[in-house]
């Protein structure tokens, strides 16, 4: 990685903690009444010029943010936290607001999510280099590396070809996490999806195929020259590596054929015999956690480097985890633990928190699970705000892409958001022209258009009279049938607070988010290496 050589650092200031560092707690979810204060530190960061800095998308985003800095100034951020609600479209935010309020017994329509109370907001344009409607890999790369790239690829520019390892040489990018590690900051990942999935994978991997999580496929003559994503995580060369990483995806790290430690009979997804978990724990002060017991036993206020993989694949949905609260921590608990660990570094930190399963529930046409995931994601944001200081920590909350969820009809205020649409005070369902009731929430496409029969599928619209549409397993009806509901191409929201948040405004290109984080933290150089 190249860095600008300047006589003076881009940012040099003293940040003093507002309280003494808290003592280690017995459990990671212990209450925090005040922001965690890191030791007093002097920030003297040399701004980097990442290897993708000559990319047109990068240059255009850099110029756009520089114009805002010239007009508004820029406060320095010691820490950066990026929250990504995977698939959290604007209708998802609206529905989650109503859902969260109604769940708490208050007026849902006027309820305010934590993210909605952040002082700055904008819209983000989510198209990728080659797609009108993008996937999570290209959009995550845009946010973390500042370039729009081809869908289904991670950590590379659009000049590289999908599924072809040979094409990525000379077209790799430096993520904000790699830049932070090189500058001596602490870094962390929290996700409810697999740690090797698209959004967290954009923080550390370079691959022409996002699906190569545990092994490399057959992508052209040089396919074997790539490392799989799990291997790239363990062998990540940036700085001294992640201080903390938590989520699912254990199966990609076990040696090929190895049995999962929690699920007898379930074996690894790897094709080789490398035991990546053994490689992790062989390093000094590197700890591995696989369950809540290990999570609660870990002292996150120590200097241990922690890898926590709670499931072979994605973590459980919150509505299902509630049936077994002892099984794995919530996203709020993981966020609390991560911030506790990262705050031990006096130089500051960069943290990603992904609510990954909002997206998965939408793909299933299952609004109940999607909204619960969104509510829990919002609670993790509250946790972060409670634990940090808005004077030194930039928090950005956004989504990578949209979904086809709709909110329609003329339901009266207070009508259950997961219920049948009703304009009447007595709750009598409204009827469509086919004489049957309909739900307020629906999808443009997805599995809810058809039901399985002995002869195949019946795709006529079903009468929902007497059906409990609020049940967590109910699939909202959709307009046309698909095995999996798709992403949407509409803009998504950005919410922000802290130093640098004043740059979040208007309608922004998604890759400008990287520039906001990089410039506010002093980690990334402006035009002409400033």
Image (cartoon, helix red, strand yellow):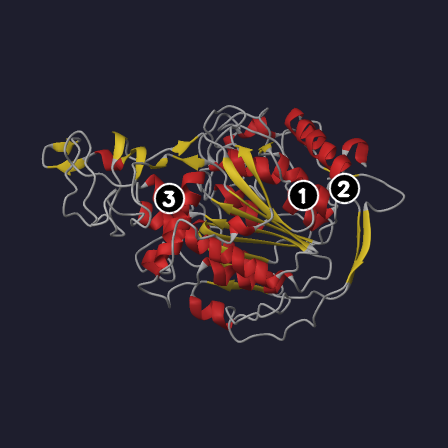
Front-most of residues 9 and 478: 478
Front-most of residues 434 and 237: 434
Q: CA distance from mark 2 to mark 1?
A: 9 Å
Q: Are marks 2 and 1 in contact (CB under 8 Å)?
A: yes
Front-most of residues 10 and 96: 96
Q: What residue lies at 35% left-to-right and 58% top-to-bottom? A: 103
Name the residue tied to disc 1: 502
**Mark carried by residue 526:** none
Name the residue tied to disc 3: 360
Mark 2 closeness class: few <14, some 14–19, many ≥20 residues within 10 Å: few
Q: CA distance from mark 3 to mark 1?
A: 32 Å
Name the residue tied to disc 2: 73
Question: Helix, strand, or loop for circle 1?
Answer: helix
Place of residue 71 in the rendered image (x, y in percent of width and height, measured from the top left): 75, 35
Place of residue 187 in the rendered image (x, y in percent of width and height, measured from the top left): 63, 53
Mark 1 closeness class: few <14, some 14–19, many ≥20 residues within 10 Å: some
């Amino acid at each position: 990685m190249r860095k600008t050589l300047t006589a003076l650092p881009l940012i040099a200031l003293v940040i003093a903690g507002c309280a003494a560092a808290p003592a280690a707690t017995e459990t990671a979810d212990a209450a925090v009444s005040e922001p965690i204060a890191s030791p007093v530190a002097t920030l003297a960061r040399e701004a980097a010029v990442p290897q993708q800095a000559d990319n047109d998308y990068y240059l255009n985003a850099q110029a756009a943010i520089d114009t805002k800095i010239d007009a508004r100034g820029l406060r320095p951020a010691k820490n950066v936290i990026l929250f990504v609600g995977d698939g959290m479209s604007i209708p998802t935010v609206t529905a989650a607001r109503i859902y969260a309020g109604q769940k708490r017994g208050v007026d849902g329509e006027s309820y305010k999510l934590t993210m909605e109370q952040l002082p700055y907001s904008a819209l983000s344009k989510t198209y990728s280099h080659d797609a009108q409607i993008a996937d999570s890999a290209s959009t995550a790369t845009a946010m973390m590396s500042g370039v729009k790239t081809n869908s289904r690829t991670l950590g590379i520019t659009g000049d590289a070809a999908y599924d072809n390892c040979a094409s990525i040489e000379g077209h790799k990018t430096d993520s904000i996490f790699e830049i932070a590690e090189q500058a001596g900051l602490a870094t962390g990942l929290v996700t409810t999806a697999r740690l090797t999935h698209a959004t967290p994978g954009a923080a550390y991997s370079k691959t022409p195929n996002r699906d190569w999580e545990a092994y490399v496929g057959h992508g052209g003559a040089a396919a074997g020259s790539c490392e799989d994503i799990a291997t790239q995580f363990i062998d990540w060369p940036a700085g001294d590596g992640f201080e903390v990483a938590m989520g699912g995806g254990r199966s990609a790290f076990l040696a090929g054929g190895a049995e999962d430690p929690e699920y007898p009979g379930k074996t690894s997804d790897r094709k080789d015999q490398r035991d990546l978990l053994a490689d992790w724990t062989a390093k000094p002060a590197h700890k591995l956690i696989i369950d809540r017991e290990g999570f609660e036993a870990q002292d996150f206020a120590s200097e241990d480097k922690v890898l926590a993989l709670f499931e072979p694949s994605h973590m459980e949905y919150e509505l299902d985890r509630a049936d077994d609260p002892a099984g794995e921590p919530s996203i709020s608990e993981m966020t609390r633990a991560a911030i506790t660990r990262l705050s031990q570094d006096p130089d500051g930190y960069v943290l990603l928190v992904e609510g990954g399963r909002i997206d998965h529930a939408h793909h299933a046409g299952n609004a109940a699970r999607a909204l619960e995931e969104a509510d829990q994601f919002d609670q993790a944001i509250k946790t972060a705000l409670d634990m940090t200081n808005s004077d030194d920590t930039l928090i950005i909350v956004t989504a990578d892409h949209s979904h086809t969820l709709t909110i329609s009809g003329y339901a009266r205020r207070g009508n259950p958001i997961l219920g049948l649409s009703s304009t009447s005070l007595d709750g009598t369902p409204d009827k469509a022209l086919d004489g049957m009731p309909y739900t307020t929430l629906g999808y443009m496409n997805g599995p809810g258009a058809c039901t399985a029969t002995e002869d195949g599928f019946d795709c006529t619209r079903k009468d929902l009279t007497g059906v409990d549409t609020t049940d967590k397993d109910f699939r909202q009806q959709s307009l046309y049938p698909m095995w999996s509901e798709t992403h949407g191409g509409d803009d998504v929201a950005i919410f922000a607070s802290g130093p640098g948040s004043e740059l979040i405004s208007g309608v922004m290109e998604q890759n400008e988010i990287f520039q906001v984080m990089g410039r506010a933290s002093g980690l990334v150089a402006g035009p002409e290496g400033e």
